[in-house]
Structure formats: structure tokens, C-alpha cells
Amino acid sequence: MKKIALYWQILIAFVLAIVYGILFKDQIIYVSWMGDLFLKGLKMIIIPLILSSIISGVANIGDAENLGRLGAKTFGYYIFTSTIALLTGLFFVNIFKPGVGADLGFAEEIEGLAVAKESFGDTLMNIVPENVFQAMVDNQMLSIIFFAILIGFFITKTPDKSKKVLTDFFNASFDVIMKVTMFVIKFTPLGIFGIVAKQVAENDNLFELFERLGLYMLVVLIALSVHAFVILPLLLKTLGKANPIKHFKAMRTPLITAFSTSSSNATLPLTMEAIEHKSGVSNKVTSFTLPLGATVNMDGTALYELVAAMFIAQAYGIDLTFTEQLIGVITGLLASIGAAGIPMAGLVMISVVLSAMGIPLEGIGLILAVDRILDMFRTSINVWSDSCGALIIAKSEGESLKV
């Protein structure tokens, strides 16, 4: 009997979870534990995976010139695509104006916005950790990535004997972590079933939400779709010389996992496996660009933040000038870089954009009800953009791809 592909297993689990969540809301506790356990398993391997992959990748890159070139290409891609995403969102929100005439009576209470008081300057300062172990405990991904790049770079500066021992050690560590990753990935269908069933059971007022915020959600989804299915494939075809459809097929499992978990970091192990083994990108590029992308490259989040800010401004009757909207684009770019790859981080970062544009922070309560739903879509776009970037950068390094 032919084994069912993992993607189809996940898809079947996804559909069954929706049915279970609708029919058996009171029995959701019997399956939700599978989703919690699966997420714990993914989160367990994130930091060891990031450390071993980046140190191994940077050590294998070789000299500072190669590292600088790869770093410049990576950040150049991230800034370019995030800016395009922001402009796409701005274009559609100005055309449809979903906030005009919106009902202000259903705003929800919001908590925890004090986190967002941290400026972009503080974010940059906090990249350098006072205690690297504390950074690991607190999941401060930018600090962990910075530390890993430093270790990898200075391995290349050690004598040949030490360099070989250390490089072999971190290469071997990465191989072991990937074996653990593949073991966890086997449980993806069960994990997705538990996660999705719980989400469906907890969101039983979907039709009411669509009625109230339907146009806002539609604008976000149209803008995300244009970015995901028009702009990124064009970049992939022209710059990466790759077939977007074949690459999308290779990325099906990570994308449906990103959609279900709403976490770029939780999806990172699956993304790395797909990019390296199915799309044919080298470990050198994969191990450097993807962990960085899961933390820094947030196309979907950046687009969402600006559309949400414009929606709130329109709902409050605030007429923003071109300059104020441009400030929103720049702030959205910086805020998306500061947003960690965790669920609902974009909701916290949006307050930075609102403050910069002079929009009341209380307006976040207007969109809170649908944030978790839209978070699933924008996280998928974040992961899709990361994967396209890895292919484009690999091609620019002269690599031949499977797609």
C-alpha cells in the first residue's frame, strides 16, 4: 500500500479538525493536547537549530568577505520585499477605504501594550545580549542569531586544527538536530489536528465577525494575495530563475504548518528541511538566511500593520496626509523587523506604527477580534517570502536548484 504524502496527511488532518471543532466543542480538551505537545516539540528544537545551523553555516562560508556579501544580499532582499508589501497594503487600503463608516461600538479591551514602548533603537541595542543564556530562556531571537554569527565568524579566525575540530563539531550538531527535527515533523498531522480543532472551537462567532469586519479582512487578504501570488513569484522567476509553482509544491508542508501555528519560528525546522532537500538550496545559504528570515523578514506582518493602522485612522475619521502615510511605511518596516516570530507579535508592534502616525492606540481594540484569524494568513506569507529569498540568494551565489 502506497504511503500517503505528509502534505496530504496534514491537509486531511486540517479538514477533520475543522469538522471536529464545529461538532464537538465541549470535547475539545481530548484533542487540544496534541497541538500543545506538537508546539512544545517544535519550540524545543528552535534554539538548538538556530545556534547549530547559523554557527555551522557561517563557519562553512569561510572569510569575512563571503559572510558580508551573503549578509548584504539577505538584508537587501528582506528590506526590498517588506517595503513592496507595505506599499501594496497602502495601495489597497486607500482604494477600498474599509474603515470609513466602521462601527466603533465593538472595540475590545486590550492589554500588554507597554511592551511596544520599546523603540527601534532599543531593539538594536538589545541585539547584544548581556547574558546569552538568559536570551535563550527569553527567546530573544535577534540576540541568539547575533551570538551565533559571532561564534561562527571567529571559528574561521582560529588556527586550522581548532577550526576543523569546531567546524566538524557544529556540522555534526546540526545533523543531529535535523534528525530530531525530522522525528518531530512526523507528528505534524496530529499536531495540526489539535491546534486547528481548538482554534475552530474557540472562534464560534465567525459569521458575526465577517459581517462586522468583512471589508477590512478582505482588503488584508487581497493585499497579501497580490504580494504572495504575484510579486514574490515574479521575483522568484526573474531573479531566482526558479519555477514558482514547483517551489510552492516543495513548500506545501511548511506553509500549511505556518498557517495552522501562526508562528514563523515554530515552522522554521520544516522550512529548512523543505528548502534544502526539496528545493535544492545548499546548507550554507539555508542555515544563514532562514533563521534570520524567521526573525527579521516579516512581509505579511508589515503589510498587515499598515493596513490595520489605516483602517483605524479611517474608522476614527482621521485624514492622513501623504507624509504621514509615508511615516507609516517607514515605521512599519522597522516595526516588522522588531517583531519576533511568535503568535500575535504583530499586534503588539502595531502600536508602534499607530504612535508614529498619531492614531489612538485604543483603536487596536477594533481589530482584535479578527487578529488571530489574519495572523494565520500573514504568517504564511512571512514564511513564503523567507523561502523565496533563500532561493534567490542561492541562485545569486551560483547554485543550481531543483525547482
Image (cartoon, rainbow, N blue to C red):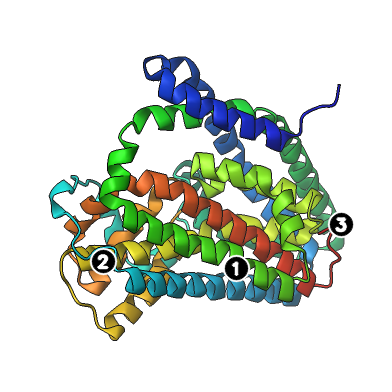
Q: Secondary structure at mark 2?
A: helix
| Foreground residue among 264 and 137 | 264
Q: Quadrant of the C terminus?
A: bottom right
Task: Work out whether residue 126 can be spotted.
Answer: no
The answer to whether 81 appears left or right of 358 in the picture is right
Q: Place residue 227 in its image quadrant.
A: bottom right
In the image, 288 versus 183, the foreground residue is 183
Q: Tell me if label 3 and label 1 are in contact, CB under 8 Å.
A: no
Residue 191 place in picture, x, y as percent: 57, 28
Q: Is residue 370 above or below residue 70?
A: above
Which comes sooner in the sequence, label 3 or label 1? 3
Residue tagged by mark 1? 230
Percent x, y for residue 209? 29, 43
Cα–Cα span, label 2 and label 1: 28 Å
For mark 3, does the 10 Å Cα neighbourhood hold few (<14), some (14 to 19), or many (20 or more) residues? few
Residue at 73 percent across and 64 percent down: it is 391
Q: Which mark is residue 354?
A: 2
Badge nearest the viewer, 3 or 2: 2
- Kind of element beneath mark 3: helix
Q: Earlier in the sequence, mark 2 or mark 1?
A: 1
> Looking at this view, is 65 or 300 the one in front?
300
Secondary element at tag 1: helix
Q: Residue at x 46, y 61 (%)?
A: 222
Instruction: Report the mark closest to the observer, 2 or 1.
Output: 1
Q: Residue at x 74, y 54 (%)?
A: 56
Taking 254 as reference, is 73 above or below it?
below
Residue 136 on image: x %, y %: 51, 45
What's under tag 2, amino acid-wise? Leu
